[in-house]
Each structure stands twice: as structure tokens, then as C-alpha cells.
Amino acid sequence: MSRINVMQPWFGEEETAAVAEVLASGWVAQGPRVAAFERAFAAHQEADHAVAVSSCTAGLHLALLVAGVGAGDDVVLPSFSFIATANAATYLGARPVFADVDPVTGNVTAETVAEVLTRDTRAVVVVDQGGVPVDLDPVRRLCDPQGIVVVEDAACAAGSTYRGRPAGAGAEIAAWSFHPRKLLTTGEGGMVTTSRPEWAERVARLREHAMSVSAAERHASVLAPAEQYPEVGFNYRMTDLQAAVGLVQLGRLDEMVARRRALAEGYAKALEEVDGLRLVADPPHGTTNFQSCWVEVEEEFPLSRDELLVHLARADISARRGIMAAHRQPAYRYRYGGGLPLPGTERLTDQTLILPLHHQLSESDQARVVEALCRAGRAR
Ligand SMILES: *Cc1c(COP(=O)(O)O)cnc(C)c1O
């Protein structure tokens, strides 16, 4: 019996060949492959502009910066997210204000955002949590007239759809992750997509120390033009090695999503027989890529969430606790004092676990997971 992993990236020989080609070219830092990956990603996601960065965290930082967020501003965002969502606002000296999530989708809604908007709210970060697309339009209808920028944390959402288009396509600005926990991976890496050309241009400069002439441009000429630094920037560049992998992975994305959705369908069918386990599903307004295939362990299930994790681990099945809640972490607990209760967030973070789901998960391995869940369901 072998270990079943919760997540596993999927690579083929094409990625190896693409990296070897970049090495042979002698140009490994941000260059022509990054530019090609940006064009391909923008086309795939129906985005006007795409700028590659070193991670989604870096992308969120720059997205909030170009949206005008600074010290003393409030940024409304879900506590129910990977901590990077709250950190990005904090880097800018802004205060994260936590909005609750709908326990069905795991996402903020226009209602939960409206509940916590403050006079100082400069931006709202919505998250496509675990790949489930957020219902963006009502949030924008709430925020746009007030001049509050809505940033989409689409870290998990490559391959998900919202109202018949790729997730993120309707965002003024969105940030993406290519960490191995997501579907499409470049090892580490991220992307910012935006409908505003001036934001794309500023993100592109800020990722490269805010240099007026890019490194690629300087190296293209024998006598490099003098560069200027009009503001303080960052080194948030992606490398051509990563972008070469990203280009191949982007070509695999649709196939990865199809496979994951088929496996999730398998879980959904099998769990119809088990009382007390609720599997995440497509919301009415879109489709998920099942980046995180979570189940809620409900009251009527014989085991608690943590007991079920132990039960699965005994069968050498690696599941994971569900999404974290930032407001409970030491880094944020003290800032959260006086915040509204977050019942949807606490319910999901306490009662969900993420099931193994990845491209190469075999039907027999999935059957083993289902069998273990069914056995636990009969445990009383
Ligand atoms: C993974 C993730 C991030 C961070 O992405 P990195 O590329 O690792 O910086 C941010 N937000 C959410 C919702 C994520 O799932």
C-alpha cells in the first residue's frame, strides 16, 4: 500500500526540454520567455494585460499598491484564506478588515463585504477560494460607485470559470499563483492581470526596481541607455526558466481541469452514500477547477474533522485540514479585536478537510480514499 498524496504537480518531458532550451540559450532571467508566457496567459484568461511576477503574494502587494492602497487605509478581505491575502495589505501599512464567507462556497459575498466596509476602505480583496469562483459582479456593483478598487485574489483559479468566461476576466486587477499547490505551476511564480494599461505598466516597472529601462532592453543594446528610478520598486521578477515551464503547463491546463473535475465527480457520486459529508461543488454562477476538493464534516458524521484526518492517515492517505483563518493567527489576532464575528469562516476552517485530488490520482487510489471515508461513516 503506498501513500496517497493530497496534491502533486504534473510534469512531462516537455517541461524538462523547455528548461534545457532556456539554459542552452544563456538567458535565464526575465526575458523573452516571460514575455511569451504573459501573452499566452492573457489570451487564455481573456485578460487585457498580464505581467509576470515572482509569486501571487508579490502580485497582490503590487496590485494593492497600484490601486492606491497605503498607510492608514482599510482593505476588506476574507480571513478565510491563505495568510498571504492579509499580508499583502499589511505590507503597505493598511489594516486588513475581515469579511465573513458564505459557508456554501467559502467566498465573500456583496453582503458580507457590505457589512464591514468602513469610511477608510480603499480596496476589497475577493478570493476564488480553492478554485470556487467568487460572485464578482455584485461586489463590483457595491464598490465601483464608491471608488473602492476590487482586487481578485485568483491564486487558485486558473481553469475555473465565472459566468461563462475564465475566472478573473471581469476583474479590474487580479493576482495568480503558480505555486505547486495550484494546478498550473512554475515552482514559484505569479501573474497580475488587469484591464487598465497604466496599472499593467506600473506593475511591470515596480517588479523590476521601478527601473525606467528594463534589464532586457538594456542588454539588447551594446551601449545600454541610462536608467532612472522614479520611485522605490521591488525585485519581484519571474525567470525565463520558470516562464518556459509555465508555457508548457498552460498548454496542459484544460486537460488538468477536465481530469480533476472527473475525479471530483467520482467523489460526489460515492459520497451520496455517506451521511454527514458535504463536498464542495460548482456555485450557480460558475465552475470550479477543484484546486482544493474539500468536504465539510457535519455534526451528524460519526467522527470529528480531526478524527477523520487521523483515520485517513492510518490508511496512508494524506488529507489536509481545510483553509486557515487569518484572524486566529498570532500575526493578526491582536489587530482583529473588536471585529465582527465570522461564523461562516469559523465553521469552514474547523469542519472542512481537503481530499487527495491531483492529475495522476488513479481510480484505484480514489477508490481507496472513498472506502476509508465510507468505513469512517459507519464507525459508530
Ligand atoms: C496560494 C495562495 C496565495 C499565495 O500564492 P504564492 O504564489 O505562494 O505567493 C495567495 N492567496 C491564495 C488564496 C492562495 O491560495
Image (spheres, rainbow, N blue to C red):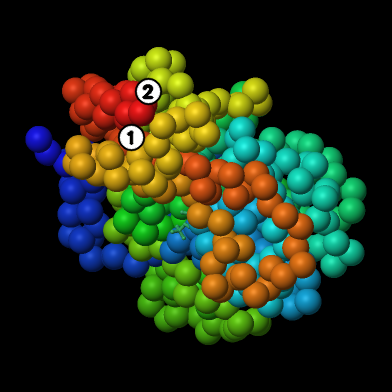
**Residue position marked by numbered label 2 in the rendering:** 267
Please state if 116 lies on the left or on the right of 276 as rendered: right
Question: Residue 228: x and y, percent?
Answer: 59, 83
Cα separation between marks 1 and 2: 10 Å
Please report the residue visible at 60 percent of the width from the left and 50 percent of the height from the top.
346
Screen quadrant of the N terminus: top left
Residue 266, placed above or below residue 116: above
**Residue position marked by numbered label 1 in the rendering:** 357
**Residue 129, quarter of picture:** top right
**Residue 61, quarter of picture:** bottom right
Near mark 2 (Cα within 10 A), the count class, few <14, some 14-19 or many ≥20, is: many
Q: Foreground: 1 or 179?
A: 1
Question: Is disc 1 placed on a helix, strand or loop?
Answer: loop
Q: Are marks 1 and 2 in contact (CB under 8 Å)?
A: yes
Please state if 137 lies on the left or on the right of 318 as rendered: right
Please report the residue visible at 37 percent of the width from the left and 59 percent of the height from the top.
188
Q: Foreground: 210 or 68?
A: 68
**Residue 359, quarter of picture:** top left
Please report the residue visible at 65 percent of the width from the left and 53 percent of the height from the top.
78
Question: Residue 283: x and y, percent?
Answer: 61, 27
